[in-house]
Image (cartoon, rainbow, N blue to C red):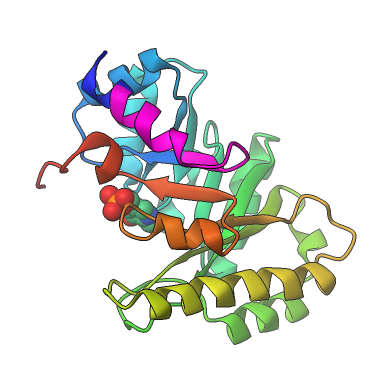
């Protein structure tokens, strides 16, 4: 069996079947993606628009591509024709741009709000109070081409597992709170995209519905 296929098989043995694995293929050689694809894995995550578009053009069209990295407004137009889900919506401006570009081609786009849950200032995302404020001021009915499916978050990069657990727990609580308020009656709003190679087990314990795992499956990334 090929190495990546074996990694995937072993990895998925310990992941509940209802959790979706986004195989994070950023800066991985194409051959490794092919191995995953041939084995039957068809959900990939990338964090750079240029690389994502390049790979999309090379690989078969039955792959679900997920954008997990920070997204600049001026690049939205390149993604809307094919992207399966944008995990990194972190501003009203971005929301507006996705809606506008998706509307032009009449293709609603699934999105997650990226929420800042980590202690590090460097981690991106919108802080919970700002997200609630955004939702109060801007009913999502204004954005018919954006389908908000849930929340995404990244925990602090630390060995302190209790800290990580607390952060994932807070994301789950926020999802539950939003589900009862701004998303009441919206069955589509349910996703929690959280957990990477170092912390996915904690994320699963805390209710992740999608995990984004790269190096555990594909090995070390190429340097830029
Ligand atoms: C790179 C990346 C991942 C995967 O990280 P690994 O540690 O390789 O599993 C997950 N989420 C985001 C947002 C990333 O940028």
The part of the chain drawn in magenta is 6-21
Extreme residue in the right direction: 185
Q: Residue drawn 77% across and 50% down?
A: 188
Residue 173, x across and y down, in percent: 66, 75
Residue 71, x across and y down, in percent: 42, 56
In the rendered image, residue 8 lying in the magenta stretch gets the answer: yes
Left or right for 86, reference 104: left
Left or right for 76, reference 2: right
In the rendered image, residue 170 lying in the magenta stretch gets the answer: no
Q: Residue drawn 73% across and 70% down?
A: 176
Residue 81 falls in which quadrant of the image?
Answer: top right
Using the rendered image of the protein, determine whether residue 150 is visible from the camera's viewpoint.
yes
Q: Reply above or below: 127 against 79.
A: below
Residue 155, x across and y down, in percent: 40, 70
Q: Residue drawn 21% across and 40% down?
A: 27
Q: Reply above or below: 30 against 19.
A: above
Left or right for 17, reference 142: left
Residue nearer the viewer, 114 or 18: 18
Q: Residue drawn 36% across and 32% down?
A: 10
């Amino acid at each position: 069996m090929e190495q990546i296929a074996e990694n995937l098989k072993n990895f998925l043995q310990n992941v509940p079947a209802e959790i979706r694995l986004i195989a994070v293929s950023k800066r991985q050689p194409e051959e490794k993606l092919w191995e995953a694809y041939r084995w039957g894995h068809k959900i990939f995550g990338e964090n750079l628009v240029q690389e994502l578009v390049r790979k999309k053009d090379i690989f078969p069209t039955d792959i679900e591509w997920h954008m997990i990295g920070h997204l600049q407004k001026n690049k939205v137009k390149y993604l809307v024709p094919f992207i399966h889900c944008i995990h990194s919506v972190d501003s009203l401006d971005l929301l507006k741009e996705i809606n506008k570009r998706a509307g032009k081609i009449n293709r609603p786009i699934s999105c997650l709000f990226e929420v800042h849950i980590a202690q590090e200032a460097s981690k991106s995302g919108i802080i919970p109070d700002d997200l609630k404020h955004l939702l109060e001021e801007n009913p999502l009915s204004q954005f018919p081409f954006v389908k908000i499916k849930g929340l995404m978050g990244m925990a602090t990069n630390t060995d302190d597992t209790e800290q990580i657990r607390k952060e994932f727990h807070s994301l789950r609580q926020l999802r539950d709170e939003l589900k009862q308020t701004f998303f009441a009656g919206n069955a589509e709003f349910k996703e929690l995209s959280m957990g990477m190679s170092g912390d996915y087990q904690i994320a699963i314990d805390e209710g992740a519905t999608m995990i984004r795992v790269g190096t555990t499956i594909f090995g070390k990334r190429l340097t830029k």
